[in-house]
Image (spheres, grey):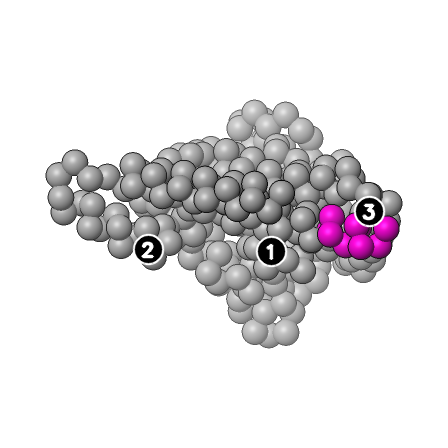
C-alpha cells in the first residue's frame, strides 16, 4: 500500500511539474497579447489541478491533512500579524475619510471601505480585510488629502478593494505555505502577485487619466518606503525593486511587453532570426515545436503505461 501511494505521489508531482512548466511558458509567449486577468487564470490552473488531483489519489487523507495544517498555520500567522498591527492603527480624521469617500463615489467603486491611520514609523498604505475592506494610511497623511499623490495611492488601494485582492493575496500566501517548496510553484505565485499589482495599477491609472503622474507618485511612494526600510522600519515594497521597475515600465510603456513576459532566450533568438527572412514567424515555429514536445511526451507516457 505504501509503495502504491509513493508511486501515485511521484506521478502527481511529475504531472504538476509539467503543467507548471507548460503554463509558465505559455504566459511568457502569449502573455503580452492577453490582459492581466487572463494571465492570472492561466497561472491558477496548475494549482487547481494540484488540489483536485491530490484529493482523488489514494493519499487524499494525507493531502487533506496537509491542507488543513497549512490553513491553520497561515491563518494563525495572519491573525498574529493583525493583532500586532492593531495597537498602532486608529480611526482616521474626518478630512481624509470624506476625501476617500468622494473619490470612491467619483470612480464608482461599489464596495465601501473603512479608513484608518497607522502611526507606525515607515508605515505604507495598504488595503486590509478579507471581508470588511479597510484602507490604512500612514501617519502624517491626514494633511495631504488634496495631494495628487494621495489620490494615486487611494486609487491603487481602491482598485485592490474593488477586486477583493486582500482575499486573493491571502489565498496566494496559503498556496505558498502549501506548495512553496516547489521552485516552479514559487515562480508562478510570484507572477500571480505581480499580475494582481499590475491589474490594480492599470485600473488606478485609468481612474486618474494620467499614467505618467500615477507612475511618478508610485516611484515617490516607493522611495519613501525604501528610506523607511533603511532606517530599520522596513517596508514590503522596498524589498522588491525588480517588481517596482516592472510596474513602472508597464505604466510608462504600455505597448511593449513587460520584462517578466519576455521570451525565453532560445525563442527570442528564433524570433530575431525569423524577422530577417520573409514568411517566417515565431508563432508558427513555436506552435510546431510545442506540438512536437507534447507528442513526444505522450508517446513516452504511452510506452511506460
Magenta span dominant secondary structure: helix
- Dot 2 corresponds to which residue? 266
Q: Residue, x 50% and y 33% (percent of image)?
A: 38
- Dot 1 corresponds to which residue? 186
Q: Point out the frontmost of discs 2 and 3.
A: 3
- Judging depth in this view, the residue of 65 and 238 nearest the camera is 65
Is 263 situated above or below 299? Answer: below
Task: Work out whether residue 163 can be spotted.
Answer: yes
Q: Residue, x 46% and y 44% (percent of image)?
A: 296
What range of the chain is rendered magenta? 1-9
131 vs 219, left or right, is right
- Judging depth in this view, the residue of 136 and 254 nearest the camera is 254
34 vs 195, left or right, is left
Q: Are marks 1 and 2 in contact (CB under 8 Å)?
A: no
Which image quadrant is residue 135 in? top right
Q: Residue, x 86% and y 45% (percent of image)?
A: 61
Compute the Cα span from label 2 to label 3.
39 Å
Q: Which mark is residue 150?
A: none
Q: Secondary structure at mark 1?
A: helix
Q: Residue, x 47% and y 56% (percent of image)?
A: 244
Q: Are marks 2 and 3 in contact (CB under 8 Å)?
A: no
Compute the Cα span from label 1 to label 2.
23 Å
Local crowd size for mark 3, using a 10 Å CA cut-off: few (<14), some (14–19), many (≥20): some
Q: Point out the frontmost of discs 1 and 2.
A: 2
Q: Secondary structure at mark 2?
A: helix
- Dot 3 corresponds to which residue? 59
Amino acid at each position: 500500500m505504501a509503495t502504491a501511494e509513493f508511486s501515485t505521489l511521484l506521478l502527481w508531482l511529475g504531472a504538476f511539474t509539467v503543467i507548471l512548466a507548460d503554463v509558465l511558458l505559455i504566459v511568457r509567449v502569449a502573455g503580452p497579447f492577453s490582459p492581466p486577468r487572463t494571465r492570472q487564470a492561466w497561472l491558477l490552473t496548475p494549482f487547481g489541478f494540484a488540489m483536485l488531483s491530490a484529493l482523488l489519489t489514494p493519499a487524499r487523507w494525507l493531502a487533506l491533512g496537509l491542507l488543513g495544517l497549512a490553513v491553520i498555520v497561515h491563518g494563525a500567522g495572519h491573525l498574529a500579524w493583525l493583532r500586532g498591527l492593531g495597537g498602532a492603527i486608529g480611526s482616521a480624521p474626518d478630512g481624509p475619510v470624506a476625501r476617500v469617500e468622494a473619490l470612491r463615489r467619483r470612480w464608482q467603486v461599489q464596495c465601501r471601505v473603512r479608513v484608518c491611520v497607522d502611526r507606525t514609523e515607515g508605515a505604507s498604505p495598504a488595503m486590509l480585510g478579507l471581508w470588511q475592506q479597510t484602507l490604512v494610511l500612514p501617519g502624517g497623511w491626514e494633511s495631504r488629502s488634496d495631494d495628487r499623490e494621495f489620490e494615486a495611492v487611494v486609487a491603487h488601494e481602491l482598485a485592490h478593494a474593488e477586486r477583493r485582492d486582500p482575499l486573493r493575496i491571502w489565498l496566494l500566501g496559503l498556496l505558498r505555505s502549501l506548495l512553496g517548496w516547489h521552485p516552479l510553484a514559487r515562480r508562478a505565485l510570484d507572477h500571480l502577485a505581480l499580475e494582481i499589482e499590475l491589474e490594480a495599477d492599470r485600473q488606478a491609472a485609468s481612474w486618474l487619466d494620467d499614467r505618467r503622474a500615477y507612475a511618478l507618485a508610485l516611484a515617490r511612494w516607493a522611495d519613501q518606503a525604501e528610506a523607511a526600510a533603511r532606517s530599520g522600519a522596513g517596508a514590503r515594497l522596498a524589498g522588491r525593486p525588480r517588481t517596482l521597475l516592472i510596474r513602472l515600465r508597464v505604466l510608462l510603456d504600455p505597448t511593449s511587453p513587460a520584462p517578466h513576459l519576455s521570451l525565453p532566450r532560445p525563442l527570442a533568438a528564433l524570433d530575431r532570426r525569423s524577422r530577417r527572412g520573409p514568411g517566417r514567424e515565431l508563432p508558427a515555429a513555436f506552435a510546431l515545436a510545442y506540438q512536437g514536445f507534447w507528442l513526444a511526451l505522450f508517446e513516452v507516457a504511452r510506452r511506460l503505461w
